Image (tube, helix red, strand yellow):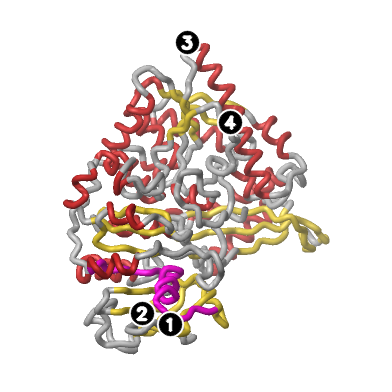
Amino acid sequence: RDGPFAASAAAHTHARAHSHSRIIRMAPKNAQDTHTVVVLDYGSQYTQLITRRIRELSVLSILMPGDASLERISKANPKVIILSGGPNSVHVEGAPSVPDGFFDYVAERSIPVLGICYGMQLLVQRLGGTVENANKAEYGRMPIIVQSDDSVLFGASVHKGDSQQVWMSHGDEATKLPVGFTCVAKSEAGAVVAIEHAEKRLFGLQYHPEVTHSERGQETLRRILFDVAGVDAGWSMENVLEEQIEIVKNKVGPDAHVICALSGGVDSAVAATLVHKAIGDRLHCVFVDNGLLRFKEQERVMDMFRDHLHLPVDCVDHSAQMLTALKGVTDPEKKRKIIGAEFIECFKNFKSEIEKRTGVRPTFLVQGTLYPDVIESCPPPGSDQKHSHTIKSHHNVGGLPKELGFELIEPLRMLFKDEVRKLGAIMDVPRQFLSRHPFPGPGLGVRILGDVTADNALEVLRAVDEVYINTIREFGLYDKIWQAFAVFLPVRSVGVQGDQRSHSHVVALRAVTSSDGMTADWYPFDHEFLKTVSSRITNEVKAVNRVVYDISSKPPSTIEWE
């Protein structure tokens, strides 16, 4: 991992087909021949998304920590440098910054720099401007107003007074620009949201162009790369499958056996198919009924494995142990950690079973970990993403016990959900798997707020979720929605059912649209659907007398409630 392509687990691959194998195999001497964009990571939850958007434009993008040395940055021979967003404030002592000599380095080589959110504030502060706490923070989708007819950032087709929708997430703002910089866009509230120093090729955006909800964000990135920097689009992603298979073969070797935990979802199905292509029958798949599954999930998923995926799968019932361990636990982080520990205990037992059958003790565990799981958990050691703030632990990332007893294989770790679906399609994974809505590893454990074993919550939630998803399918909406599910709330409300007073449970319904799970909007069901589904739930699930619909976007909310 030496040279310009050593930007850590977070750098060596990503998204739609850039495996770290390809990057590692590229010798440093070829760096001069490849037009590369370096993204310096200051901890934004969207940093990897910047890398992804650039690679979607067939340009090699490498992620490095924000405090990477100038020598390390220079070895990558970047054609463009992007400073990411982040949770810190530039005016606070000890806030992360660019290395000493950075601005002299980019000026001498005429390297364009784009600062995004925190990155823009960093440009302003380090070059003599002022950044202060905003009187009013700006979060979510909102319009910006262009302030110039001849902006390098926006191009000749965009004129003063034009507006576009963007995705904001900031609590600080630039109140005084450095000498030579021009404000080329403001928010409706008057905050400076786009700046440029055309001569020095320094640019800043206070919003996130990399998220899909910034309607012209990709166009802005394309303009910086191709029109401003003259980058060549020569990075190919067609061989991702071949490279990931090679990685698995090299890691596992010719004799070792591997366990793969299948959940019935897209991620584990694609991961299992990929690993099976690499090592064949030395892969042993297991589906764990952890007691936190949806209505008839075990039966349905095992049928899908048998009839469609054609992989040999063992089903292990670990529900009693799981629910015993979770009894009385209400803290969401603690629940996730317990679920993760119980999964590993189950896999250890399955490992012993496979050893009895084959005479070989499996030493590897395959998981369908995706990049959104990683960045919402505490960044793993060695990831170089030290400026991130933990959002929540995922059972297969931050929730794992320290002593696994396995070496992990995570072939999808740096991919996003839509990219995993594309990879699965290449391998002919059946649509029945690829079209399924995401389902969290901890299952209904994170959709019941509080103790999962109390108030018959699991059975109530299963019944509600079944009615909800069936109604979505009946209305022809399933494939239009990224993810839909019900949530059991730890409250009761007064109602009238059967002419009698009731004091029953409240459930929330959640449905979101997204392309990658990094940002999401709530789905705008029409009144007829909401009336129908609410009536069905309260009539068919007697323990529920009130239904509410979650209309929160991500951010500020996460998709799951816990």
Q: Which residue is mark 4?
A: 403
User: Do the CB atoms of the residues marked 1 and 4 lie less than 8 Å apart?
Assistant: no
- Which portion, as a residue range, is magenta? 110-132
Separation of disc 2 and disc 1 at Cα? 8 Å
Separation of disc 4 and disc 2 at Cα? 49 Å
- The circle drawn on residue 192 is 1
Lower sequence index among marks 2 and 3: 2
Amino acid marked by disc 1 = Val
The answer to which of 347 and 383 lies nearer the viewer is: 383
Amino acid marked by disc 3 = Gly
Quadrant that contains the N terminus: top left
Lower sequence index among marks 1 and 4: 1
Q: Is residue 94 magenta?
A: no
Separation of disc 2 and disc 3 at Cα? 65 Å
Q: Which residue is mark 3?
A: 359
Q: Residues within 10 Å of mark 3 (few under 14, many from 20)?
A: few
**Left or right: 394 with respect to 233?**
right
What is the x, y in percent for residue 516? 41, 55
Lower sequence index among marks 4 and 2: 2
User: Do the CB atoms of the residues marked 4 and 2 lie less than 8 Å apart?
Assistant: no
Q: Residues within 10 Å of mark 2 (few under 14, many from 20)?
A: many
Viewer-nearest of labels 1 and 3?
Answer: 1
Viewer-nearest of labels 2 and 3?
Answer: 2
Amino acid marked by disc 4 = Glu
In the rendered view, tell whether residue 85 sits above or below residue 249.
below
